Image (cartoon, grey):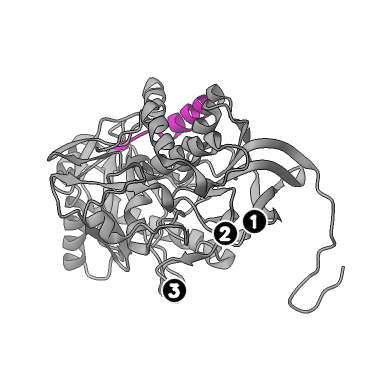
Amino acid sequence: MASDFNTVTEPARRLPVYGEFDVVVIGGGPAGLAASVSAARHGARTLLVERYGFLGGMGTAGGVTNFAGLYGRRNGEMQQLVHGVVDDLLVRIDALGGLNQPQDGMQGRIRVRSYDVSAYKCAADQMLVSAGVQLLFHAWAAAVVMEGRSIAALVVETKSGRQAIRAHRFIDCSGDADVAHFAGVPFELGDGQGSALFPSTMFRVGHVDAPRALAAVGEFSAINKLMDESALSKPGRYRFPRQGAILRPNKNPTEWRANVTQIRNAAGMAMDATNARQLSDGELEGRRQITEYFRFLKNEVPGFEQSAIVDIAPQVGIRETRRICGDYALTGEDILSSARFDDVVGINAWPMEMHVDGAISWGFPRDEQRACNDLPWRMLTNSVVSNLLVAGRCASMTHEGQSAARASGGCFVMGQAAGTAAALLASGQTFRDINVAVLQHQLSQDGVFFDR
C-alpha cells in the first residue's frame, strides 16, 4: 500500500454484487419512501438503501416529529394539498395510535401534523414491505461506477464489506446529493457564501404538567416571550442559541418536542454536514445546547419543573447541504409568487423558512388565497447523468427556494414523481425524454393533487 504524508493509496479490488434491480433508491426519508413505494407499485424491482436501521430520514433520525408542508391555503382555506403515497403512510401511523391532530401556528398561516417516532418507523416498514420494496439497512453510499453518461452500479459500505449494486435507474434521496456528487453532477453547497440554513439537534421532554405548560406556552411565540423575560430579569444566566424556539406537545400532551438549538462551526457559520470534522463537532455542540436549554425549561417555564429529557435525536438535524444544479432551480420568488409550471408534479405548501444566524426568518406567499406553489419535473432531472433523478432537499433549488420545498410535504411530492417516472421509463429512454403529460396522468391516478 503506497502512501505519502497526506494520502493513502487503496489497492484495486473486485467487489461482490449485492443484487441487480430496475430501480435503486438511496435514502429512506420522505422522498425515498415515496420514490421506492411508487416504483415498486408500478412493477419495478426496487431496492431502498438506508444508512440507519430504520426509515423516516430527518423525521426519525433527526427527531423532527412532525410533517410540515402537507397543508396550505387554497381559495383562502387551509387544507391538505399534498396527497398520494403520504396518505397511506398517515393512515398506517394513525392505526398504530401515533398520529396527532393538525396543529396551526404563525397566526394560522402554517399547519403541521405531529406523530410518534416509533409509530412512524413501524408504519414505514409496513408500507414498503407491502409494496414489495426490498430494503438494505446499515448501508452507506460510497461511490458509483459509470458507463458513459449512465450509472452502472452503486458502491455501498455494509457490515458485510464493500459491495456493488447494479440497476437500470437510480434515485438520489440522500439529502446530501451524495450519489449525484459521486457521478459528477454539479451542485451548490449551502448559501454559496460558506454558510447554509443552520442545523438543529432535536430533543423530546417528558413528564410535563400539560395543563400548566399549555397555559404558559400554548402559542408558538409564547416560549420566546418567556426567553426574552428571562434574559432581561436574569442577564447572563441563560445563553439561547437562537430566537424562534419551537416547543410543542406531541400526541401524549405530557411529552413535548423541542426545536431550539442552532449549530455553528468554529467560524460562526452554519455547520457543514458534508465535512466530517464539522459534523462530529456539531453533534457535541447540539447536546451541549440541549442541556443548557433544558436548565431554562425546568427553572423558568411553568409545567416543566418535574420534566425530564426522554430522547435526543440520533443525529443533528440537517436542513441544507448540497443542492444539484438541475434543469430548473426552484427559486424563492417561485415560493413568494405561488408559481405555476406546465410540468408540475405536485404542490409545495410550505413558506420560506430561513434558519439564519440566531433566528428564523419566514417568507410567505403574497397571494393569501393561494399560498402554495407548483413543483416542476425539471427540478429532479439533470444534463449530466442520464439514468439519475434527485429528489428531496438536495433537488435543484436555490438557497431560498430550498428553505421551503425541503419540508417533508415537498419531499413526498418529489419522491413520488421520481419513483413513478423510474418505473414508467421505457427501455432506451433517458429521464429528460419522459412524456410529462403521461407522468402527470399517472400521478393523478395515484392520488397526487394538482391545483388545476
Residue situated in front as seen by the camera: 295 or 318: 318
Give the distance between the C-alpha atoms of the residues marked 3 and 1, in whole angstroms: 30 Å
- Marks 2 and 3: which is nearer the front? 2
Is the Cβ of the residue at disc 2 closer than 8 Å to that at disc 3?
no
Q: Look at the numbered disc 1 and give the secondary structure of its residue.
A: loop
Does the rendering let one see residue 205?
Answer: no
Q: Locate the C terminus by quadrant.
A: top left
Disc 2 + disc 1, Cβ < 8 Å: yes
How many numbered dots are placed on residues in this image? 3
Residue drawn at x 46%, y 36% is 34
Give residue 194's mark.
Answer: 3
Q: Residues within 10 Å of mark 2 (few under 14, many from 20)?
A: some
Up the image or down, 211 lies above or below 41; here it is below
Q: Is residue 200 above or below residue 438?
A: below
* Amino acid type at mark 1: Arg
- Horizontal and vertical percent for residue 206? 35, 39
Nearer the N terminus, badge 2 or badge 1? Answer: 1
Image spot of residue 176 (x, y percent): 51, 56
Residue placed under numbered mark 2 in the picture: 384
Please name the residue that numbered disc 1 is placed on. 149
What are the residue bounds of the magenta stretch? Answer: 113-127
